Image (cartoon, helix red, strand yellow):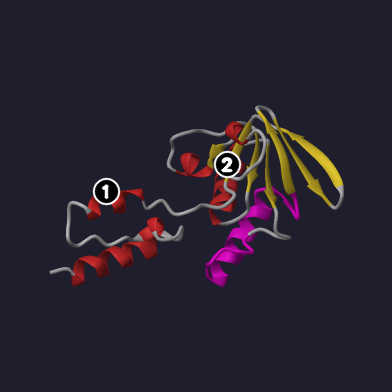
Amino acid sequence: MPPIPGIENAALVTDYLTHQTGAGQNVVIIGGGLGGTEAACDIAPHADQVTILEMLPDILAAANHCLNNDQHLRAMVAERGVKVIGGARVTRITADSVTYEKDGQTETIPCDTIFNAAGFTPNDQLEDLLEGEYDDVVVIGDAVKPRKILTAVHEGYHAIRVME
């Protein structure tokens, strides 16, 4: 979780993407990587306003993906009316608003839903539990580093293929 006062008021974007939570009509997504941008594009047709707040100058700047995916997502953002605010540093979150700083100015966006898509860290807690019980434990997927599912599938296939 990023160290933002009120971060507990934001749901994880992965909870939306896995259908564990819904979105309201005025949505703010903190983070414009793949997860945040994909969620924004999915939410926008059913919402009044969707805003992505990104610390970097533009969305998808740190995403590891191909040019075709980048162009398609950017086109969807534009055609679905998702508002993008780059260079924005979120400073406070409440149950119904997000405050950010950009170019020395402080702005607050009222909203009914806030999603945190501001980066992910690996969770490899299961590795320690399994290593004491099994000889061949291989860490794959997001337990190594948050990436795409295709990477996890390839790593899982390779891990099984080389096990005896």
**Residues drawn in magenta:** 60-88
Q: Position of residue 59 (x, y in %)?
A: 66, 58
Q: Earlier in the sequence, mark 1 or mark 2?
A: 2
Name the residue: 60% across, 64% down.
62
Looking at the image, which is closer to me, 75 or 124?
Answer: 124
Mark 1 vs 2: CB contact within 8 A: no
Looking at the image, which is closer to me, 28 or 127?
Answer: 127
Q: Position of residue 142 (x, y in %)?
A: 41, 56
* Amino acid at the residue labelled 1: Leu
Q: Position of residue 133 (x, y in %)?
A: 18, 51
* Amino acid at the residue labelled 2: Ile
Q: CA distance from mark 1 to mark 2?
A: 38 Å
Q: Quadrant of residue 135?
A: bottom left
Name the residue: 52% across, 67% down.
65
Task: Tell me if residue 121 comes above or below residue 8 in the rendering.
Answer: below
Task: Tell me if residue 138 comes above or below residue 91 in the rendering.
Answer: below
Residue placed under numbered mark 1 in the picture: 129
63 is within the stretch colored magenta? yes
For the residue labelled by badge 1, is the local secondary structure a helix, a strand or a loop? helix
Q: Residue furthest right?
A: 104
Q: Quadrant of residue 122?
A: bottom left
Which mark, by number, is residue 43? 2
Q: Quadrant of the N terminus?
A: top right
Q: Position of residue 13 (x, y in %)?
A: 53, 43
Looking at the image, which is closer to me, 159 or 111?
Answer: 159
